[in-house]
Image (tube, coloured by chain):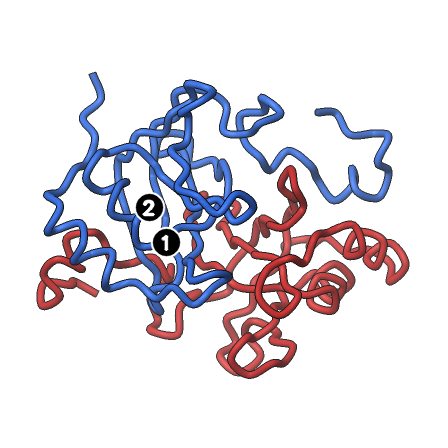
Chain colours: A blue, B red
Amino acid sequence: MVKTLTLTEEEARKVADSLNYRHLNGTAIAVVQDYRTKEVLMVASVNRESVTKTLTTGYAHFWSLSRSQLWLKGETSGNYQLLMDFLVDCDGDAILFMVEPKGPACHTMSRSCFYRRREDLLNPGSSKH
Amino acid sequence: MVKTLTLTEEEARKVADSLNYRHLNGTAIAVVQDYRTKEVLMVASVNRESVTKTLTTGYAHFWSLSRSQLWLKGETSGNYQLLMDFLVDCDGDAILFMVEPKGPACHTMSRSCFYRRREDLLNPGSSKH
């Protein structure tokens, strides 16, 4: 049984309020990394609400820029990401979620969204995904 | 001697043109990861020009949102980041630079910009940086 990180609502709001939401539509950037393998799984946007929800529940939540709504990762796919560590960068506009992934991070079912190399973009037919 | 990745100008432009610059001021998000330790070092913005420069020179270049100019990482500090691998995410708006760092990534001289944990934000005086 993996123990996730959780905070009280008050603590979570304090952390969420200390970030700098200077990116698109009042968001910060979240990088999601597998806490065991250290593989970078995905990048998404977060607002105050999604940071607070992530910290109180222990499950990664994002802000969907395309749908303009809170997005619990895994809500439809079952591929939840359990929060194991939470780091913030020097200027507070980017967060690192260290997670235990419950399945592929990518909607293509790839473990990581970063499955295309430079070479694949030069020769699109050669992508081994 | 570390061999960096480089492309011709034409190849680099082809890769740069295939990305989706949908973030602030026509940028994509770049995540920089140490290719040996897998530590996430920093997050920054990139536009077409910085992606092209990175791919032709083998040195990480970004787009400074605050200064609105091309930014060769290490130009003033000497802490260059040599490109060892280059990955793009599923929707093309985020890039992963796998690098050999020539010094700390952060302007605070921390190896990574992600040196603050959740706890440090709850108790700002306790930051061990």
| Residue A84 x, y percent position in the rendering | 26, 35
Please name the residue that numbered disc 2 is placed on: A50
Tell me how many marks there are.
2
**Label 2 to label 1: alpha-carbon separation:** 5 Å
Q: Name the residue nearer the viewer: B15 or A10.
A: A10
Residue drawn at the location 51% of the way across and 64% of the way down: B102
| Placement of A32 over or under B123, stated as above or below | above
Cβ atoms under marks 2 and 1 closer than 8 Å: yes
Residue drawn at the location 39% of the way across and 41% of the way down: A70
Looking at the image, the residue that sits furthest to the front is: A68
Side (left or right) of A24 relative to B8: left
The amino acid marked with disc number 2 is Ser
Please name the residue that numbered disc 1 is placed on: A47
- Quarter placement of the N terminus of chain B: bottom right
Side (left or right) of A1 relative to B57: left
Numbered disc 1: what chain?
A: A
Residue drawn at the location 65% of the way across and 77% of the way down: B70
Q: Secondary structure at mark 1?
A: loop
